[in-house]
Amino acid sequence: MRLRRDGSPTSRATLASQRKRRHRRSGAHDAFHVGTRSRASALHPAQIGAQKPHMRHPQRSWLAILLTLLVAAAGPARAQGDPAFRAFLDGLWPKAKAFGVSRATFDAVTRGLAPDLKLPDLALPGRTQPGAEGQAEFTQAPAQYLSEGLLQTLATRGRRLWREHRAALAAIEERFGVPAPVLLAIFGRETAFGEARLPHDLLRTLATQAYLGRRKERFQEEFLYALKMVEEGHLTPARRKSSWAGAMGLVQFLPSDFYRYAVDGDEDGEIDIWSSPMDALASVASQLRGKGWRPGRRWAHEVRPPQELDCTIAEPAHRLTIRQWLARGFTPTSREPLAAAELSEEASLLLPAGNTGPAFLIPKNYFVIKDYNFSDLYVLFVGHLADRIAGGGAFATPWPRLNQARTSEITEMQQRLAALGFYADKIDGKAGMATRAALGRFQKARGLAVDCWPSPAALSALRAAE
């Protein structure tokens, strides 16, 4: 039995009518919407069909094939101006065949493809900036990214949706163990509850990233999964819009995520993460559970640190139980008491603004959300938005206004820290926990003021250290 949006039963006749309307919409958003990445390891192609025995694949029809051909013909001109790209695509045919893609589908999809050289994260001659350039999660300071106005707006809408669809969301939470506010927060952050307009073509984007991107192998696999989605009728022309990294649908799944985690949340016999919010939210819950979500535990605990705070210990490898952190002078800002299980849970210290601003103890569920999008600011936004939707207030400690170095400067900072023996992580231009802790160790070793913040002044100190 399927439930209406208000939780009441829906008749079979009504369901059939709804399915027909959804088919006609071809991916358009429904009335759920209101006003306004590291991923798991690859599956072997032979495993794909067995992953979702409950998934009903739509039967391919001549109309679907014709639509695919028309879209391909209407796309960019055939990549005759880039024979190497054409050769690259042709070289993928054996792998596509192993994924269950027919020759007709492969030819129809690749015939009109040309690389999109405007995408970020491409390894192009003369393009010196790392791939994170332009991504707000990696270029903005916390006070800018965690916009109070945006958080308030999304929280208001999230609470409204929770009230309107409480029965359906409760069923998803009971099934997967992930709270509805967390799911709604991801929905709000990813696509503003379905209102964001994705600017790129999924297949062109994935093909370009597989050919010219900095993570070619990963995107090659995603392109093959996308071809499989076309073959099976999931990826219609109306559903091909994506982000610059090939994330699609209401909650920004990669094609491989679709096969690993997508589920039928509204029980209509179809998995539709493009126009069915309940399918999309249930699929997010499925993914978070698959990545290790712990039911009944919080995503993080905001704390007030002791006066003598050593920001160099704020990295994932330094873990203590929450009880041990509290014994060292860290005080929860929430008045809600911690359960015994939470006190026994291991957590790391997170200082997103260095030794100024809010501090957090981050247990397992924090890193589960981070596996959805590999950015501390993203997790902070989603987790805090979930708290707001659930009735919580603003951060207990205000965010300071900080001057963050540019991506290219952080790259140089990482290179210099590595050369001096303070940093052993990726050189990626991202001001993450490892970079901030390494900078703090450098500052401490040189007798400088220790703030663990990647500012232009910190780079100047590094340059002077040689």
Image (cartoon, grey):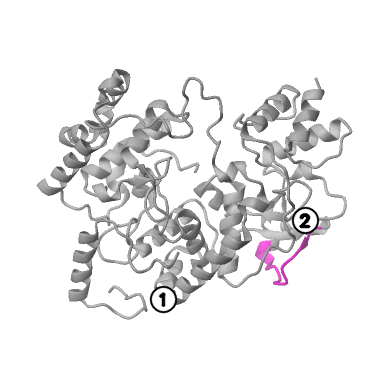
Residue at point 72%, 25% (across, down): 416
Prevalent SS, magenta region: loop
Q: What is the quadrant of the C terminus in the image?
A: top right
Q: How many marks?
A: 2
Q: Position of residue 283 (x, y in %)?
A: 39, 57
Q: Quadrant of residue 417?
A: top right
Q: Is residue 295 magenta?
A: no
Residue 61 horizontal side relative to residue 165, left or right:
left
Quick one: quadrant of the N terminus? bottom left
What range of the chain is rendered magenta?
A: 330-342
The residue labelled by disc 2 is 324
Q: Which label number is shown at residue 27? A: none
**Residue situated in front as seen by the camera: 249 or 285:** 249
Residue reaching furthest to the bottom = 8
Which residue lies at the image location 50% right of the left edge and 56% below the top edge?
Answer: 189
Dot 1: few (<14), some (14–19), or many (≥20) neighbours within 10 Å?
some
Q: Gap in Å between the C-alphas at discs 2 and 1?
A: 39 Å
List x then y, in percent, for residue 332: 75, 63
Looking at the image, which is closer to me, 53 or 351? 351
Depth check, front residue: 347 or 197: 197
Depth order, front residue of 57/43: 57
Q: Is residue 101 visible?
A: no
Give the residue number, with chain letter if any, for mark 1: 167
Residue 151, image quadrant: bottom right
Question: In this picture, is 72 found above or below 388?
Answer: above
- Magenta stretch holds residue 331: yes
What residue is at 68 percent from the left and 29 percent from the top? Answer: 414
Q: Amino acid at mark 2?
A: Gln
Question: Do we see residue 349 in this rendering?
Answer: yes
Q: Is residue 444 left or right of residue 293?
A: right
